[in-house]
Image: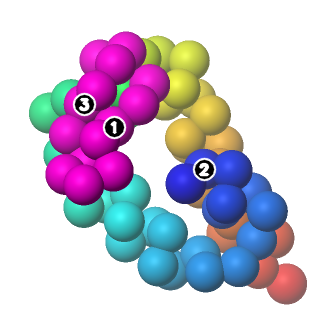
Amino acid sequence: LCNLLLAGGHKEELLDTLRAMPMDNGIACETVWPESGKVNTGAAFATFAGFYANAIIEAYENEN
């Protein structure tokens, strides 16, 4: 989802999907199950949290 955000398009739909994912009690994780959004691997994965935050920032900064 983050790669799709960075590529552009469908921003609101992707952000809604990311918001709906429970992840690891709301903390970014490496992978999630696509059916449920629940943590699959890499619980509380700090480096992904940075990538996740960057993708969201880029999506909003590149609106124009």
Inspect the image, locate mark 1, and give the three-letter code of the amino acid beneath it.
Answer: Val
Residue 11 % position (x, y): 59, 76
Q: What is the quadrant of residue 45 in the picture?
A: top left
Q: Main secondary structure of the magenta part?
A: loop
Q: Nearer the viewer, residue 50 or 22?
A: 22
Q: Which mark is residue 32?
A: 1
First in sequence: mark 2 or mark 3?
Answer: 2
Question: Dot 3 surroundings within 10 Å: few (below 14), some, or many (20 or more)?
Answer: many
Dot 2: within a 10 Å radius of its alpha carbon, few (fewer than 14), some, or many (20 or more) residues?
Answer: some
Residue located beneath label 3 in the image: 39
User: Is 2 left, or right, of 24 in this rendering?
Assistant: right
Q: Secondary structure at mark 1?
A: strand
Front position in the image: 36 or 24: 36
Query: Do residues under tags 2 and 1 come within 8 Å of each other at their CB atoms?
Result: no
- The magenta-colored residue range is 30-43
Q: CA distance from mark 3 to mark 1?
A: 5 Å
Residue 36 in view of the camera: yes
